[in-house]
Image: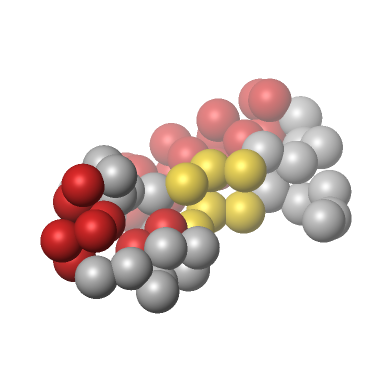
Amino acid sequence: GGVESLITRPVTTSHACLSPEECKQVGISESLIRLSVGLEATADMLSDFDQALSTNK
C-alpha cells in the first residue's frame, strides 16, 4: 500500500471476479466508487473533488 489517494470502481477491480448477480447480492453496483484517502491535506482533497465534479456537469 502507498500513501496516495485512489478512486476505484469495485465492479472492475476488487470484485471483478463476481458475476453481476453476486455483485448485486453484496451491494456492489456499476456506479459504486471506492475512495481510499492518502496523506493529502483535507482542503486539497476537497478542492480536487469540487473541480472534478464540476467538470462532469
Identify the colour scheme used.
secondary structure
Residue at position x 55%, y 34% from top?
47
Residue 36 vertical position relative to residue 56 in the rendered view, above or below: above
Residue at position x 67%, y 38% from top?
37
Q: Is residue 29 visible?
A: no
Pinpoint residue 18: horizontal percent, then vertical percent: 33, 68
Work out whether residue 24 or residue 29 is closer to the camera in this orientation and state it.
24
Residue 24 vertical position relative to residue 20 in the rendered view, above or below: above
Determine whether, in the image, residue 5 is placed left or right of residue 34: right
* Number of numbered markers: 0
Determine whether, in the image, residue 36 is placed left or right of residue 12: right
Q: Quadrant of the N terminus?
A: bottom right
The answer to which quarter of the image holds residue 44 is top right
Q: Can residue 20 be seen in this view?
A: yes
Pinpoint residue 43: horizontal percent, then vertical percent: 66, 25
Residue 33 vertical position relative to residue 17 in the rendered view, above or below: above
The answer to which quarter of the image holds residue 50 is top left
Residue at position x 76%, y 30% from top?
41
Residue at position x 50%, y 63% from top?
14
